[in-house]
Amino acid sequence: MSGALTVEIRKLDSLTVDERLQWNAWAAADPDLASPYFRVEFAEIAGRVSPDSALAVFHRHGAVVGYFPHQRRGGAVQPIGAPMNDYHGVIGPKGATPTLAEVASLLGGTRFSVNGWVGPASGGLKGESFRTTIPEDGGYEAWYAARRQAFGKYFKDKERARRSMAAEFGSVEVQIGVRDGALLDELIALKREQYRRTTRHDIFACGWTRDLLHALMGAEDEDFGASIAVLRAGGRIAAMEYSLHAGQRFHFWFPAYVPALARCSPGIVLSMETIRIGSEQGYRDFDYGFGGEAYKRYFCDTIQPVTEAAILRPGLPSALGQVTEAMLGLAGAERAEMLRNSLRRRWNVIEACETNGMDRFKGVALAARVALSKATGRMATAS
């Protein structure tokens, strides 16, 4: 669609009833926007919790052609709820929405960062998101039979792991759709311990990210919400996962398991049971998000392209800076590029979570130390 594109910046709580209906109707009409992150309910809840949130409403010829909920961190612009937002893009009529470059230009920040952009985009890093699609005919049993035939050794191993868990710790029981604030706090504590072990930035230290998960779980809507799946062995929690769901889409989000039971693959067993029970409740698409763990290839049969990009205002230096670039250069060209992308992603997370300069500085200092350790470790191995 041609014509001048303009943007109006508003508060998310200014949406009218008709605008909310239009938003979700556009999302429902486009299979690429089926994720719960594109629902107006997600944007409104995140807008109440995430600092400095706003709504961009795009117009052409006086008509609305898209909504983009976002947040600002200093001069940087990010999707609303980042880094707790796996998919983002402009919600509007398919084929008429602004491109990634147009959105970045009109919003005018010093930097525009996305890691799971869905929609028209040129440049950036291309990635893939992974989903399990349960067939209408045959349901879970048909899907699992096909997976087991394709990857027999893997799934036989997981069946054996479940039997071992039951034999050693007691009967295995799974619940999904649990909404329990105390259980969510327990899951968050497990994730924070995982971040400490793996030297990743603790996304829950800032507070508002924890509040977002609680607020989403408290949403009272038949067609949108969040909940926890729990696997217990002998009555004791072995694994949990916090997920977001809307319509027929079920998005796996924050998994956690008890490290002492890792040999029994409790997280994988929980995912399998969540798919089985969830499909009985009417869910058809189980979304694992983009990139990441190798196990996804055993489960997933549907792939959706996404774009990761950081668009800088012309003339601004790289966020990494000359010192960091020189340090990464120690690792060699190929290794340096991988570390550069890793450090940029860490910075995006830190910038999104932390709303004051001191906390950002601490996070960046840790990320730089980790990158330096990886770079110099690579040198030592090669020498």
Image (tube, helix red, strand yellow):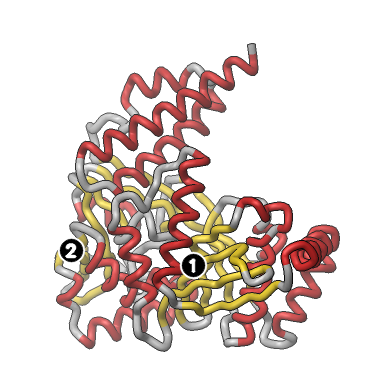
Q: Which residue is mark 2?
A: 7
Pointer 1 local density, CA inside 10 Å: few below 14, some 14–19, many at least 20: many
Q: Nearer the viewer, residue 2 or 378?
A: 378
Which residue shows up at 38% across the image and 62% down it?
88
Above-or-below relation of 87 to 202: below
Which x, y percent locates residue 184? 43, 66
The answer, for residue 66, to whether it is visible in the render is no
The answer, for residue 292, to whether it is visible in the render is yes
Above-or-below relation of 262 to 317: below
Which x, y percent locates residue 20? 27, 82
| Apparent side of residue 272 relative to residue 371 in the rendered image (left or right) | right
| Apparent side of residue 332 relative to residue 43 in the rendered image (left or right) | right
Q: CA distance from mark 2 to mark 1?
A: 35 Å
Q: Residue furthest top?
A: 383
Using the image, tell me which numbered label, if any, was put on residue 8: none
| Apparent side of residue 227 relative to residue 9 in the rendered image (left or right) | right
Which residue shows up at 49% across the image and 69% down it?
243
Which residue shows up at 59% across the image and 66% down it?
237
Contact between marks 2 and 1 (CB within 8 A): the answer is no
Which x, y percent locates residue 249? 52, 76
Which residue shows up at 46% across the image and 23% down it?
372
Pointer 2 local density, CA inside 10 Å: few below 14, some 14–19, many at least 20: some
Q: Secondary structure at mark 2?
A: strand
Which quadrant holds residue 218?
bottom left
Q: Which residue is mark 1?
A: 242
